[in-house]
C-alpha cells in the first residue's frame, strides 16, 4: 500500500487489546473505528479503494498511525488501559 489514506469511518468505536514491536512487553485496550474506507496506490501504480472491518480495520489503523509517528499508547483513553504482556497472557488469554 503506497500513500494510504482513510477516506471515511464509522461512528462505531470498539476497544481491543493491542501490542506493538515498537513497545515490547506492554499491551493496551485501544479504541479504534470498527469499519473504515481506505484508498491507496498498489505496487502496479493503480489507485485502489477498499472497506476494512473489525480486526483488519484495527490493524490498518494501528499501522497507519505509525506513518504519523503515533503509537497505540497515544490512543488510550486512560493509563488504566495498560497492562504488561505477562498479565495479558495470564488474565486475558486465560479467559478465551
Image: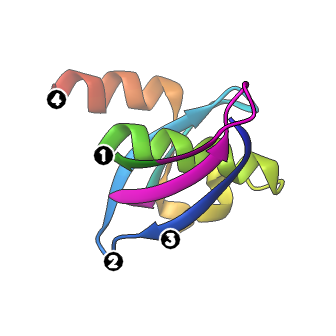
| Front disc: 4 or 1 | 1
- CA neighbours of label 2 inside 10 A, class few (<14), some (14 to 19), many (20+): few
- The numbered disc on residue 77 is 3
- The numbered disc on residue 11 is 2
Give the x, y percent position of residue 58: 45, 46
For marks 3 and 1 on the same chain, the one whose residue lies earlier in the sequence: 1
| Residue position for label 1 | 54
The secondary element bearing badge 1 is classed as helix
Spatial separation of the CA atoms under disc 2 and disc 4: 28 Å
Task: From this view, report whether residue 55 is shown above or below residue 38.
Answer: above
- The numbered disc on residue 89 is none
| Front disc: 3 or 2 | 2
Residue range of the region highlighted in magenta in the rendering: 31-49
**Residue placed most toward the observer, 78 or 87:** 78
Task: From this view, report whether residue 52 is shown above or below residue 90.
Answer: below
| Residue position for label 4 | 95
Spatial separation of the CA atoms under disc 3 and disc 4: 23 Å
For marks 3 and 2 on the same chain, the one whose residue lies earlier in the sequence: 2
| Front disc: 3 or 1 | 1
Spatial separation of the CA atoms under disc 3 and disc 1: 19 Å
For marks 2 and 1 on the same chain, the one whose residue lies earlier in the sequence: 2
Amino acid at each position: 500500500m503506497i500513500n494510504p489514506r482513510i477516506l471515511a469511518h464509522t461512528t462505531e468505536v470498539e476497544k481491543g487489546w493491542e501490542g506493538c514491536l515498537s513497545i515490547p512487553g506492554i499491551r493496551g485496550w485501544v479504541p479504534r473505528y470498527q469499519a473504515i474506507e481506505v484508498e491507496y496506490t498498489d505496487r502496479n501504480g493503480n489507485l485502489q479503494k477498499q472497506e476494512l472491518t473489525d480486526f483488519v480495520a484495527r490493524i490498518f489503523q494501528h499501522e497507519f498511525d505509525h506513518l504519523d509517528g503515533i503509537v497505540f499508547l497515544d490512543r488510550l483513553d486512560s493509563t488504566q488501559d495498560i497492562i504488561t504482556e505477562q498479565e495479558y497472557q495470564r488474565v486475558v488469554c486465560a479467559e478465551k
